[in-house]
Structure formats: C-alpha cells, structure tokens
Amino acid sequence: MTYLVVDDSKLARLSLIKSLKTHVGDDENIHQASNGLEAVSLMENKKADIVFLDLTMPEMDGYEALPKLLEINNKAKVIVVSADVQTKAKERVISLGAQLHMQKPINADKMQEILEII
Amino acid sequence: MYSLTEDEKDVLQELMNVAYGNATAVVADMLDAFASLSIPNIQVLPTHELLATFESMKAESYFFSTQAFSGEFNGESAFFINDISAQNLAKHLELETADDLDDAILELTNVLTSSLTTKLSQELDTEVSFSLPSITKVPLQDIQEVETFQNYSQVIVIDTDLNFEDQKINGKIFILTKDASIQWLKNKLNTILELLL
Amino acid sequence: MAQEQTQHNLRTLTVDEKIVANIDNGILVLDDSLCIHHYNKWLELHTGKKEKDLLTLKISDVFANINTKTLTRKIKTALRIQTPTFYTANTSKYLIPIKLNQIKNAKFEYMQQDVSIIPFDLEKSLVALIITDQTNMAQTNALLHSHIEEIKELNQELIKERDTIDKKILYIRLNLQAEISDISHALLNLLEYEKEELLGLDFFNFERHLMSATLKEKIKEALKKKEPTNFEERTLSLSGEVLYFQSTFVAEFNAKGVQIGFIIFRENITNAKILAKTQEKMLASSRSAAMGEMIAMIAHQWRQPLSLINTVIATMKVKRELNLLTKEITDNSYEKIQNTVKYLSETIDDFRDYFKPNKEISRVELNTLFEKSIFFIKSEMDVHSIKYSLKASESVEIETYKNELLQTIINIMKNSIDAFEESDEREKKICVTLERLSTHVSIEIVDNAGGIKKDIITKVFEPYFSTKSKNGTGLGLYMSQTIITEHLLGSITLTSENNQTKVLIELPYKIRSQK
C-alpha cells in the first residue's frame, strides 16, 4: 500500500504518521506533502492508494486538490482530515469524492476506526 | 522576553486550527451559515505592538468585545467586528434593537472564546472557566485607554478571521495570554512535541 | 475511588440543595423548549410565584417579556458547546422582571441581571440559569457614565476656554531657568513670531532689544521673591515696531505647590503710550503758541507806555532846542520815564509769573484771577471796544493750580476777542458770572460775537480744529479742555445760542496734588 499525507503542518503530518504506523507497520510507503500542489505532483509519481488530506492549506487547499487527486488515480481512497467540522464542509468533501471526513487530530484509536471503515 | 520556536508555533497553530474549526462549526450552526476557514496567525508581541495592530484597524468603526478565561491557561479574548458586519449580523439574525445586536455580538464572542479555549484546553489537557463577556464600543483611537490591555506586558496573539462570505460577516478574534501563561503554554507545547518526535 | 464516589453523592444530596435554596442568586432549570424544571427559593421570594405552580410551564409564558428565540438560541448553544452562555445586565438589562422598591437604586425600575446559562444535563437537554443581581453595579456604571460625560463636557469647555485665553490674553510662560516654555497666540501675533521660534529661548536674551540692564536686574530680583510684580516693558516686534507692555510677573506653581516657573501677563499699552506722547507734543506746541500770544499781549501792553516814553523824550528834545528845558521839566520827565520803565518791567514779571506752569496747588480768589486776566488782555479788548463785566455775588475761593486756570481763562477770552474781529456787533460784550454751588463753583463766560454754527460746535474740542484762517494752532480749546478735565478735575462745555457763545467751566472747591 502507498500512503500520502497532505497537511501544511509538519507536526500534524508527524502525528498522523505516528498513528498510522501503530497499525500498518514501519515498512509501508508513506509520502508527505505540505500543500495541494505538492500532493498532486506526488500523486502523479507515486499513485498513492490512500490519501489523508487536510483542507486549510496555502498554495492549493484541500477542496481544490481533492478532485485533481482523484482524476490522477480514481481508485485512491481519500480521507479528509480537517479541523473544519461544519456540516456543510463535510457534505462538500463527500460530494467531491472523499471516502471519509474526520476531525483532527487523528490519534491511534481514530486511525483504527478509519482503517476499519475503508 | 518569551518567544516561540518554529515547532512550538506549528503545534500551537495546529491546535488552534482544530479549536477554531470547532468554534466555527458552532457559530455556523448558530447562524445557520457556512464559514470559510483561514490559517490562524500566531505571534508573541509586546503589548504596544498589539496596540499598533489594533491601531491599523482604525479605518472602520469596530465593535469590540472581550472575555476573560481562567485556569492554568488563562487570558483574554478580544473580538472585533466592523460596523457593516455587525449590521449584516443583525439583519441575518432578524434583530430589532441595538441592545439585541450587542447581545448577539457578546454571544458570538462567548461562543468563539468558549469553543476555542475549551477545545484548546482539552488538547492541552487542562480546564478553563469563563467570565461574562463585556462589550465596548470604543473608537479605536482610544484603545490605549482600554484598561484591560495595560495588564499585559507581552502577549501571545492568535488572530483568526471569522468569515461568512455569503452573509458578509467577518470579524477578527485575538486570544491574548500573558507572561505566566506563556511559560505554561510553552511547557505544554514541548510535552506534545516530545510525544510526537 | 469508591469512597470518593460516596462522598460526592453525600455532598450532592444534602449540602447543594440547601445552598441552592439559600443562595443569593436566582437559579432556574430549563430544558431546550424553555419548560421550567426548577425554580429556587430566591426566585420564589423575588417574583412572588411558587415553584409548584410553575413546573412544566414555559418560562416565556410566565414572563411575557422574554424573547423566546434568543433564549432558545442561548440554551442550545450552551448545550452544544458545553460551556456557559450569558446575558449581561449591561446590554440585556434583565431576564426575569423583578420590580425594585429601593430608594438607592432609583434609576432602575427592574433589577438588572447577569445570567449565566450553564449546561446541566446533556441527555435531558437541561440548563441551569444562574441569575445575579447587578443593579448596584449598573447604577454605579450609569453614574460613572454620566460623570464621564460631565467630565468630557467640562474638558471641552476647558479646551474652549484655553483657546479663548490663548487668542485673547497676552502671556508668556517661563520655566525656572527663565526659558520661554509657552507663549499665547495673541502675543505671538503682536510680536510677529512663530511659537517654535521662541520656545526654549532665554527670556532676557530674546527681550534684550530694549530692556536696560537695570530693568533686567530688577526683574530677576523680583522673580526671586516669587511675588506678583509689575513692570513696564518695551519690546520690538519682528518687523521693528515698538511695543509697550504693562507686565505682571507671577510665579507659577503645580498642583503640589512646587514652583515650576513664571507667567508673565502683559497688557498692550502701546496705543496709550503713543497717545500720551502725542499729547505731550500738543502741549509743547500749544505752549509755544501761548508764548507767541503772550508776546503779542506784552506788545499790546507796552505800546502805550512805550509811546508815553517816546512822547516824553520828544517833548524834552523840543524844549531843549528852544532852550526851554528847565531842571524841573527834566526831573519831571525822568521821573515819568522811570515810572513807565518800572511799569514795563512789572508787566514782564507778571507775564512770567503767570505763564509758567504751577507745581503747587494754591488758594485762588476767582475775582482777583479775573482782574489779572483782564490786565493781560485789557489793551486788546480796548482796541476792539469790548466791554467787560464780572458778576459775582461774593468772593469765590478755590484750591487749584492757579496759572493753569488763568491761562485757560485767557485762552477762552482771547477766543472771544478773536471772534469779535469778524463781528459787526455795536455793543461788544464779554460777561463773566461766578457762582458758588454746593459741590462746585461755576464760571460762565458769555460773549455776543456771533455764536458758533451748529455743524461745527461738536468739533470745537477736537485737536487741530480751528475756525481762524491764520495764526490758529487749533489747539486752544482742546488744550483748555485737557487742562480743565485732567489737571483741574473739572468740566468744560460750550453752547451757542442766538448771537452768543457760552463757555461753562465747573471746578471742584479743592483738588489733591497729582504729582
């Protein structure tokens, strides 16, 4: 499996990856991007299977990046991980093709929940 | 003189993001509207620079409300909303009197402060309590005289825009914490950092 | 852990309810549809309603003033964010209407309330409303607010007042080193300087133009004493205009009584000074005019005695040619000449005595004074065949400056004589009447030389006004008025009727020396 973690906060990425590794082990292919643009170019190279995508980011935000990522790899599963918990925000990302919308931060328990669902 | 390292800032920013996301969701429900979120801006400033920041908002007449929060993490939040936004808020909530509008702004302040700081405290593993918010309609040129700020020598300023595009309501919220709290916060942030790295 | 739980339960069951019943706050439990679940004793007492009658009722049905929408929103928000929401007395006044019957907080009809809405039971959607009486605080706030408004108004007035003072009053502030620390715009306008040019300058240096070293020392000495002191100053404006100031130096103290400098209040006396100087000039010129007139008078007086001497000498010459000059005739002639010369010399003395200004006040008998006046102008009156009469019921004596009065009277009578030159009146008369009145004496001088035209009668006392084509300085009546009013402290009026001109002089019985 190839994972792509997209967040402008380095620590948010580290924290998510830490939770992820407690479930999938250290050997997995985990890539990081700090904004939408980087995520799209990484997607073209690495064709990630599972994407953790933040919404509020500089350069290109999650809403813009989401359809582009799916365009490159329509089999990818995108989990939006955001602080934005407005009902309308959730509805919007689901309609854009995300599998899930989860509230930040993602701890090990939440990660398990996510992995079970997908 | 305190300052925050890049990593400390990053953690705080992330925590603030989460807290602010929560707060916005509540306000969005309250107003039945959708807010666009922006990245919070975090700075450690001497008070006079903060006042200078407020000074730069002079152009528009702002409503200005504050609310104190106490606990291990304590301080004050200051919420600014400009005249037009306040009028739009009144229209949106179908308010009739100026007192109703003041009340609504106080409620907005309270909701923002409470959700922000509650969530932030949860993440920081502590508890806060809140005092009654107070509203002041000060012309900003007099803001130096707003006594509350005189008590701070240095403040952590976390400012975020509250932006309801469709309703044309936007405001700015500042979370101000002073000396002792800054040290406490730094320690907490480092604990979190150590757990991550 | 179990023990703690027990203790916690124990406390809830006994202590809390008692507190809730007795606390000095209203406690109200509502659900999110505003139905009442608890109504504490405080609320019962203040509203006169019983909890048992209210349970399950909607609070907004019990109190019609409550805005259902706002309260519902606040309750739902509190439940949603799990932290309190609030009403503040400041903006919302009150939630539960409780009439006040107090005198001390008379401003408010209803109790002003802060209300905290605390999430109480999330499952049942219950919140507790804690109601706090904030009337005292609101009253204090209102008072404070009105005082602040008052202070603001006072401040405004003060600023206005300061502005007026700055624009109207001439003043300079000095610090203790005598450097200029402030200067009013009124004074700057006179001096034609900008404020910035003068601030910080040494007062004595700036004022050096026309301030003598002795005056400087005098002022410095006075400043040391810290007592208000008056000086007359002379200063040049930027463009070189001379300014005269009557200045008062006052030490300035701060609120704690420590001296912080000086204030110099100035009065611009330049105009008065210039007027005084003009008057001096006029006086001088009227003196020289009077001198001319005196010489003319002397000439008149001397004409007859001189011609007498001439005649005596001519007679002696003829007698000697005819050898008829006897010793007796010679002696007789010498004696005549001697007497006449003596008379001439006395005349000069008289003129000199009477035409130098008096320094001292003396007793003056007015009848005698008029005799003297007539003596000086008799010959001129004779030339024009003017009859003179004096009416006085009794002797009139006053204490005044004798010569000043004499000169004035001669001046007025000379005016009458001059007026007769252009008159064809057959019976030319100058009548003087002296009268003793209770508070003053009156001197009336009336001539029948044709009177003065109405259109010019108001101008006769103006300086440089003259009806005479030649020899008139135009200062005669102006100077007469100045002398009468300013030196002799009396009054002079001039009226004209029919053919006559009447000058009325009123004088006090006694004046004090002004020097």
Image (spheres, coloured by chain):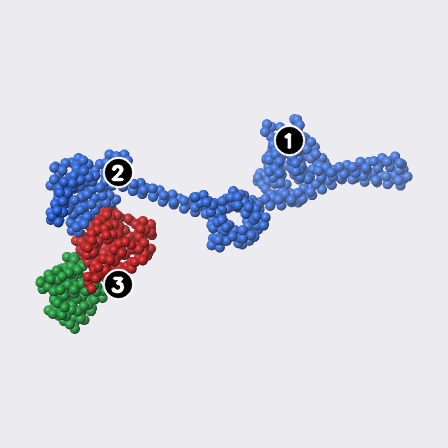
Chain colours: A green, B red, C blue
Q: Secondary structure at mark 3?
A: helix
Report whether C347 appears left or right of C225: right
- The residue mark sitting in front, 2 or 3, is 3
Q: Secondary structure at mark 2?
A: loop
Q: Amino acid at mark 2?
A: Phe
Q: Amino acid at mark 1?
A: Ile
Residue at the disc numbered 2: C108
Residue B98 image point, x, y percent:
25, 47
- The chain that hosts pointer 2 is C
Residue at the disc numbered 3: B6
* Residue B14 at least partly seen: no
The disc, 1 or 2, on the residue closer to the chain's N-terminal end is 2
Q: Amino acid at mark 3?
A: Glu
- The residue mark sitting in front, 1 or 3, is 3
Cα separation between marks 1 and 2: 80 Å
Determine the residue positioned at 85% across, 39% down.
C315
Numbered tag placed on residue C398 in the rendering: 1
Report whether C474 appears left or right of A116: right
Numbered tag placed on residue C359 in the rendering: none
Cα separation between marks 2 and 3: 54 Å
